[in-house]
Structures are given as C-alpha cells and as structure tokens.
Image (cartoon, grey):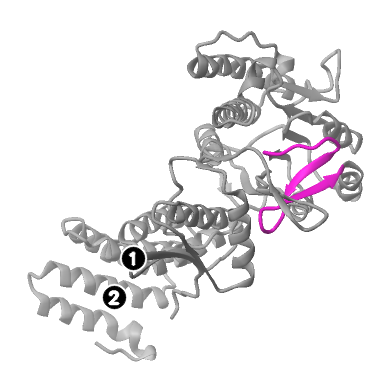
C-alpha cells in the first residue's frame, strides 16, 4: 500500500478497510493493518475523536496479539503508538504508562531499537514533568586503584564487588510512599557535586568505599581515586551552597565528622554521618562479609530515614526512628553472620550535625509539604546493555579493571586472552557492567565472544550501533 502524504487523511481509512477485507479471517494480518493505520492517522492527529478511533484500532490489535505467540515486537509497537497519541492529547500519565509497557515488551523481544526510542521519549517526558518537584541526589564512588607519584597504581580495598541494591531500595521506598519527587543517582565526582548544588537539590547523599583522613574520596574517569581536600571542598561549595536549597546532606563515609563540620560551616542545616564504628565490626574489616553488612545497613537506614522524612515528620524524629530500626536490623545481620550478640549505641551508627544538646535545631520538617504522586528518576541516560551483573562477587582484579577501562577510553577494541578458566569472561562482564552503570557509552555496550581455534578472546567494545540505521 502506498499513500501520498497529502492524501493520507482522506484516503487512509478506505485503503486500510480494503486491506482488512482482503485478509478476511487472518487475524494477525488485521492486527498489522490496524497498527499501520494508527501510525498514519497519528501523523495528522488534531481532534480528540480521532484519538479515540486510534485507541480502538490499537486495542483491537492488542487483543489479537495477546492470543498469539512471539508477538512482543508488535505489542511493543502498539503501546509506543498509544504513547505518541497520548502525548499529542497532552495526557502525560497515559503516555508514561504506555511507554513503560512498550519498554517491557521491547526488552522481552530484545528489540534494542524500540528500547532506545522508548527510553528517549521517557526521558523527555520526565524532563517536562519534573519542573516543580523537589530533588534528591545520591552520589557514590567506588575507586578501584590509587595512583602513586611515579605513575604506578595499587589496588584499593575492599576486594569484592557485589551487586548494589541501594538504588532499587530507594526507588521502592519512594514508590511505596507515593511522593512526587525527583531522584538522581550518579557517580561521586567534582563535576556531579557542583551539578547537584546548581540544580538546587533539597537533599544529597554522598558515599564512598574508600576513606582517607582530611579528604573526600571521589572516583576518576577510569576508576582511579580522586582526592578532594577539605579546603578544596570548602572553596568548591562556598559560592554555590548559599544560593541553593540544599537542606540535608547524608554522608555514608567512615570518620566523616570533619567533612560534616565543613558542610555545617557552609550553612547546610542538617548533616548526618552514617558509619558502623563499633569494635565488634573490626574483625570483618576488608572482607566480603563486611561489605555486605555495611551495604545492608546503609540500605536499611536510608529506606527508613527517607521514608519518615517524606511523610512529613521532623528531621530529628526521622533520624531517631531510623536509627532505632537500623540498630535492630544490624543486630540481626551480625547474628546471621557470626551468631554473636552485639550491643550497639546509636552514636556508634550515626550522628547528626550541627550537634545540638537541646535537639531544637533539627526539630523542623525538611519540607512543609510533599506532593502526592510518583517519583521521577532524572539520572543520566544509559545506553543499551545486554550484560547482567554477576551474582557472585569478583575478588580482586582491580589492576586489570583499571587497565581495561583505561585502554577502552583510548582504543576502539580491547582483547582479553589467557588460559581456559582463568577468568576472562567474568572480568569482561564486570568491566562492561562497570562502564554501563557509569553511562560511559550512550549508544550501548555489548559483550562479543570470539572463538579462535582453542584460544578464546573476549572483547568489550564501543558500540557504533544506532537504531536509526
């Protein structure tokens, strides 16, 4: 079928009806015709009654496709067209709902082009809807190596990389509380700190797996440690934080009282330092068990604290209740690890600055009113990735990590080769996932497995694939 552009509105219904008559009882053909007709009508959509007709066409197509096998591609296209129709009718909620369904079908069908286009529209929609929502920013660094003055590098603790469930926990928390808020999860770098402050974030959480006295540990472009001295931190934020709306900073860092004092001096009214400083945890230091324990404790505290904050209670009340629940959760976790009974004080888990004996400084609400609604994630858009995070932790390999990442930033392709079973596949997957989480290559990251004789070479490559080619 071929219809000239200027004749679409007039002759499209006639042509498509003739096509349906020819297909007769062939239901899949009718569904395809409905999708084609809807896509043509959407281009000339101007009246709501026509939008209703387009909706009927797509609903009929979906009813047919749900009874067929392996039709996820067509179902995704239906939902995508419904989203476009909702966009032209200024129905943002309906648009978002259909885009999420289209994204789900695209993932099932492994249709990367559809997934990229759907994600792009979702991000655009989020930008349009987020104007008056308060912003919470979560920044985290996981430096792999430390550069020495002679340009050599050494690996940093901890040695284990396990799957981080913090982002999922936070999204579930704000989803459950039904609060209209913007959430941004990104890397802890100098640029992102400045960006968060310039966007007038209400709350900010900074966390890092490495600590050095008198500095804030950031992450460099290739996973190297970037130290931000307290004097530099003060000068970085001094001119910005006074003009921002930042009312809360949570520091998930060991011995971070000096950083908290800098932020308090700059005018942040509420600064919370969270870390497990009890002597009972010292024997787990640097182990996989310690990292799991700290991670679960951070997730537990953050979930409870932010949950209370968005419910409208005061910062002090939210802090006290969250610490109380977190202490009990930590005791249960330690008991599960080692069957030990641990006695914990609140001050050994978290502290709030500035220190106020009368507890009146923090007896205020973070915001007077949080609107009801759904969260919007404004994190930097990631490309497509067909690699899942390994469930078992990767022990060590920090130096190899750094070498591969550094090489990928300068080369088009990097080959990993070695004896069978030495860990080439696992390292390649971990590097790819590491880059994916940091939104390094916006067009996507893929794992290529190339068999050459008996020697396997695994390549993590920059993707040049585009959905529009």
In this image, 310 relative to 195: left or right?
Answer: left
* Quarter of image, res 456: bottom left
| Residue 37: mark | 2
Q: Quadrant of the N terminus?
A: bottom left
In this image, 60 relative to 90: left or right?
Answer: left
Q: Secondary structure at mark 1?
A: loop
* C-alpha span from label 2 to label 1: 53 Å
- Near mark 1 (Cα within 10 A), the count class, few <14, some 14-19 or many ≥20, is few
Q: Secondary structure at mark 2?
A: helix
Q: Nearer the viewer, mark 2 or mark 1?
A: 1
66 or 211, nearer to the observer: 211
Q: Give residue 459's position: percent from left, percent from top.
A: 47, 66
> Is residue 448 found inside the magenta-colored segment of the image?
no
Q: Give residue 227's position: percent from left, percent from top.
A: 80, 47
- Residue at horizontal 90 percent and vertical 38 percent from the top: 266
Q: Give residue 131's position: percent from left, percent from top.
A: 66, 53
- Near mark 2 (Cα within 10 A), the count class, few <14, some 14-19 or many ≥20, is many
- Residue at horizontal 40 percent and vertical 57 percent from the top: 103
Which residue bears the numbered disc 1?
454
Q: Give residue 89's position: percent from left, percent from top.
A: 46, 63
Q: Are marks 2 and 1 in contact (CB under 8 Å)?
A: no
Question: What's the magenta region?
Answer: 208-229
């Amino acid at each position: 079928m071929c219809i000239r552009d200027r004749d679409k509105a007039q002759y499209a219904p006639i042509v498509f009806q003739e096509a349906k008559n020819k297909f007769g009882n062939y239901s899949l053909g009718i569904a395809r015709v409905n999708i084609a007709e809807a896509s043509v009508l959407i281009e000339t959509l101007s009246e709501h009654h026509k939008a209703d007709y387009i909706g009927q066409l797509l609903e009929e197509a979906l009813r047919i496709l749900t009874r067929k096998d392996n039709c996820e591609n067509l179902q995704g296209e239906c939902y995508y067209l419904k989203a476009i129709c909702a966009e032209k009718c200024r129905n943002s909620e309906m648009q978002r709902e259909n885009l999420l369904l289209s994204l789900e079908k695209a993932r099932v069908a492994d249709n990367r082009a559809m997934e990229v286009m759907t994600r792009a529209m979702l991000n655009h929609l989020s930008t349009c809807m987020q104007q008056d929502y308060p912003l919470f920013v979560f920044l985290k660094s996981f430096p792999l190596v430390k550069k020495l003055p002679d340009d050599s590098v050494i690996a940093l603790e901890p040695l284990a990389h396990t799957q981080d469930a913090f982002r999922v926990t936070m999204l579930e928390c704000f989803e459950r509380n039904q609060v209209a808020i913007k959430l941004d999860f990104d890397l802890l770098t100098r640029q992102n700190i400045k960006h968060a402050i310039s966007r007038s974030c209400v709350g900010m959480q900074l966390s890092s797996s490495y600590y050095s006295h008198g500095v804030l540990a950031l992450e460099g472009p290739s996973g190297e440690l970037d130290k931000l001295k307290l004097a530099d931190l003060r000068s970085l934020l001094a001119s910005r934080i006074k003009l921002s709306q930042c009312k809360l900073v949570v520091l998930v860092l060991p011995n971070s009282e000096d950083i908290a004092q800098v932020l308090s001096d700059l005018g942040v009214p509420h600064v919370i330092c969270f870390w497990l400083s009890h002597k009972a945890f010292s024997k787990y230091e640097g182990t996989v068990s310690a990292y799991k324990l700290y991670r679960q404790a951070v997730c537990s505290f953050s979930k409870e604290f932010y949950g209370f904050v968005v419910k409208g209670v005061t910062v002090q009340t939210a802090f006290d209740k969250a610490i109380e629940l977190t202490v009990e959760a930590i005791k249960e976790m330690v008991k599960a690890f080692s069957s030990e009974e641990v006695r914990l004080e609140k001050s050994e888990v978290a502290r709030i600055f500035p220190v106020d004996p009368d507890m009146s400084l923090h007896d205020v609400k973070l915001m007077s009113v949080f609107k009801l609604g759904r969260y919007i994630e404004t994190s930097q858009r990631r490309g497509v990735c067909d690699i899942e995070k390994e469930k078992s932790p990767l022990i060590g390999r920090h130096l190899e990590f750094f070498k591969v990442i550094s090489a990928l930033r300068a080369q088009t392709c990097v080959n990993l080769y070695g004896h069978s079973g030495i860990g080439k596949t696992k390292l390649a997957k971990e590097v790819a996932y590491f880059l994916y989480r940091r939104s390094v290559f916006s067009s996507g990251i893929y794992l290529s497995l190339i068999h050459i004789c008996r020697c396997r070479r695994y390549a993590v490559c920059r993707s040049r694939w585009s959905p529009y080619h």
